[in-house]
Amino acid sequence: MKNLENKRGTLITAAIIVAVFLFVGIAEKIAPPSWNMLFMVLKKGSIYALIAVSMNLLNGFTGLFSLGQAGFMLLGAYTYGIFTIPAADRASVYQYFDGGVVQFALPVPVALILAGLVAAAFAFLIGLPVLRLKSDYLAIATLGFAEIIRAVFQWNVLGPITNGSNLLRKFPVFQSTISYFVVVGICVAVILLLINSSYGRAFKSIREDEIAAEAMGINLARHKMLAFCISSFFAGIGGALLAMYQTSVQASIFKSAMTYEILLIVVIGGIGSISGSVMASFLYIACSEWWLRFLDQETILTAAGRGRFIAVMAVIFVILLALMVFRLVRPKAKSRVRYGVGAGICGAILIWLIVFAATGQTRVPLLRNGFRMVVFSVIIMIIVLFFSRGIMGTSELPDLFRKRVKPEKEEVAS
Amino acid sequence: MSVVLPYLLSGISVGGQYALIAIGYTMVYGILRLINFAHGDVFMVAGVMMVYLSASLPLYVSMPLMLILTVIIGFAIERAAYKPLRSAPRMSIMISAIGVSYLLQNLAAYITGGLAQQYPTVPGISASVNIGPATTKVVTLVTPFLVIALVFALVMLINHTKIGMAMRAVSKDYDTAQLMGIRINAVISATFVIGSFLAAVGSVLYFTNYTAVTYTSGAMPGLKAFVAAVFGGIGSIPGAVIGAFIIGISENIVKGLEAMLGMAGINLNIGLATFSDAVTFALLIIILVVKPTGLFGEKATEKV
Amino acid sequence: MSENVLHVDHVTMQFGGVVAVNDLSLDVDQGEIVALIGPNGAGKTTAFNCITGVYEPTNGRVSFLGKPMVENHPQGKMKKLYSGEHAEDYPHIISPTPDRITQLGIARTFQNIRLFSALSVFDNVLIAKHMRARHNWFTSTFRISAREEKRMREEATALLEEQNLLHLKDEVAGSLPYGIQRRLEIARALATNPKLLLLDEPAAGMNPQETQELTDFIKEIRDKYHLTVFMIEHHMDLVMQISERIYVLDFGKLIASGTPAEIQSNQRVIDAYLGVSNDA
């Protein structure tokens, strides 16, 4: 529990969190409409943060490699949708199923909790057979369950409840960003409390060494099930929030690709770091929805007025190219392939700059629909391969603000 | 019979195609203990490459070229994404595989513009034939035989060549094999080369059947092939093949179950075909619960 | 006075064709230090694993403080193999998981140290306190059982203090020197408040001086915590000095038992260790 003893770090972190909440709450009221993109990102980012944290609880803290998150999100999203569509709108939503069988609407907070509970209940049932499996079998079995759940919810026979393969819509949604933040904040806080409790320690011991944990009297089945259900509970709430954000639910979007996306967020943030997962979620959503959008648009540049830009770029890439070539031709050079590829890329960019400067106008190469995701996945691969600890590793935000006092190491008495 | 036959035929055919992918999974798992999540996407990339190559080149050039390129891609993926993580925890290398899968899909989406591409017709196997009351493509009939021939060749390779012996040794005991002077990297590369080659052959058969390639075409067949490998007992090649046939057939039986029951006088119109994909996973979970090592898998006891 | 603590009754453990432990019976009484010795591969660790529930024995019964704790009789194909003399002794199966056995009061260490190596020394000990605390996930998460948590921390601190490990409490367990890791593993086992302590080669990798210190240490904790100690050990100095009785295993079978002096002069034990040619 070094986190609690690190008072300074905790205080600074708390201050940052309060500041972010205040900023979101106030900015939303006064910001011009041009800021819409920011709030979209904040909403979706906060939802993904919750789901990523829930997945981290399982994969990072308990060491259970589960890939069922999309399935539990689906359960949460549908539970929320089914039980909150106002009775008056049911006829139009369930138009192929005579208005469906559920003819009442629950208040939003109750439905949110119910969404979590339904996901947790399913997790319990699924966990009974699959939690006994070892790492990769568990991964593939949970992935399989998510696919089965998706098929069941698209099944026409259940249409009166699930609306079959049609959209669920017209359910109440949060309008303001701060509402998402508050719900997500509460959920993440609960997960944090859990992780820093005795049960959290037990989870970590299972991650470290199952056999030793068992020898310490920790009931593996019970604790794994607990982690699995709690993680699914919050994934269910996350799914419900995602349904709100999208204002509609359809089973077909909760594919395994969604689980992979969340897993990658967890990796980027650092497996075993809650604050890492949260930051990575916002970063990931901001990049994919906003900052890298320009990569998807065909762009035509004119050289006029960009002389300085071209010159600077040219200098940078000439230097880089020279460095790479130098490394490449050096006797006993190591990892020639890597430098060769690097030199090739630098050369290509240089040629493009020359063409650009000569013709005065150019279509930026490669930029068109889909390029954003290519760049994005390359960045992710670089993180996975070269920065496998992610942004935070296993440390948390308060650790960053810890006063760096070298602990006095006592001589180890032998 | 006239109702069952077409489903059975396409079940056997698609099962054979899964088998070719499943071998890649099971061999890689046997040696590296890695679920190569990118393998299904290599299969898809083979399909996409075939679309583009055959647009400008004659088939007798584009097909071998596609096979070679797929093998190179499989080899390169291992070298770039898995080899650096040899000593990292199991989870990291699995995550790297998921990352590669994500990259390949996005790359394919970028190149194809996210649209379904028409797979070229391969003369000889794209034609239709009649078998009794059922009409099907020649590829459906060719697949099982081709699969059996390839598997036979592979088993020969594994049992009677030096590299095959090395593969068996590495999959039995990675560390000891390394101490015995087996060049682990060469063995692993060979595994990826064989796996990618078979996946490329599988892609020709599969897409000739389904005719459209999209950037997500590899995900489902890939998952199913992996399930087939687990079903048969991961690490066992005959197991993977038998598992793949079982999965291909049961998937198609579920698709046609209502029609079949209809023939038998039971009229169910409840859309059971929705579960044609889910049945694969149901089979997976049943086998994992009943016999976690699969049909032909060996039991391993953990040393304490 | 000397109450029976551990009673192993005709335990057999078979892996496929290999009989790792063959019809082993032994007793350990209250307050004793008993050693289980034997050449490499004799089945000592397997016997430990049967006692602690890691393996379910193929046949036999283990009782702790007079109550049956592990019990099995062969089923299916095995039935024929074991249908001999003890066929009717074990009417039903009791097969608890290792955590249940730890809760009953048996703690163990491992041959190749198994600490929670990424966690701190303090957390390693605290985790051992988890099972006996009166809390559930809800009270623990929402700090309703904060008093229980405080008690756990105090007990863990006290134990580390007694074991002279308190100054290392914030160190990462995996980064400690080997000898300290061994001591921490024993401390962690003590934290579960055991009545019986099973040590699997506690002196492995230690030099003579360290082994001597370990000898004193084991006696000390036995007296301090009123323990019974049952250990596997290869260091004969340690075994002969410390143990009151010794059991000798060879190829899964018990070949001798008795006081150190008896064992030292036992011809079968000498043969097992030195090897004996068949025509001798």
Image: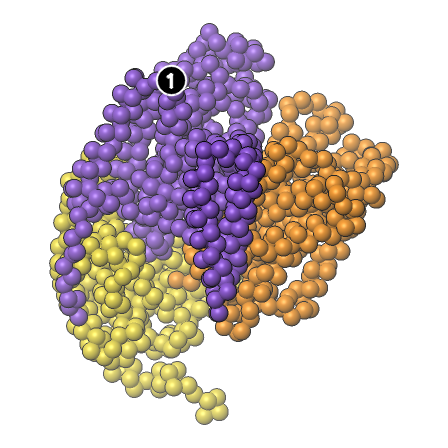
Chain colours: A purple, B orange, C yellow
**Is there any visible trace of residue B122 in the rendered image?**
yes
Image coordinates for residue B18, horizontal then vertical, percent = 66, 46
Q: Nearer the viewer, residue C251 or B71?
A: B71
Name the side, left or right, on which B212 lies relative to B304: right
Name the side, left or right, on which C209 lies relative to C74: left
**Is there any visible trace of residue A128 in the rendered image?**
no
Give the residue at mark 1. A33
User: Which residue appears at 58% of the width and 64% of the height?
Assistant: B187
Q: Nearer the viewer, residue B65 or C96?
A: B65
Which element carries disc 1, helix, strand or loop? Answer: helix
Chain of the residue under the numbered disc 1 shown in the image: A
Report the residue that reaches farthest toward the bottom.
Answer: C280
Image coordinates for residue C47, horizontal then vertical, percent = 37, 66
Q: Reply above or below: C137 against B83.
A: above
User: If the image is split into quadrants, where does the C terminus of chain A sit?
Assistant: bottom left
Callout 1 amino acid? Pro
Q: Quadrant of residue B135?
A: top right
User: Which residue appears at 49% of the width and 45% of the height?
Assistant: A378
| Other-residue count near label 1 (Cα within 10 Å), few / some / many at <14 / 14–19 / ≥20 | few
Q: Reply above or below: C232 against A18.
A: below
User: Which residue appears at 46% of the width and 41% of the height?
Assistant: A310
Name the side, left or right, on which B58 lies relative to C22: right
Q: Reply above or below: A405 against A53.
A: below
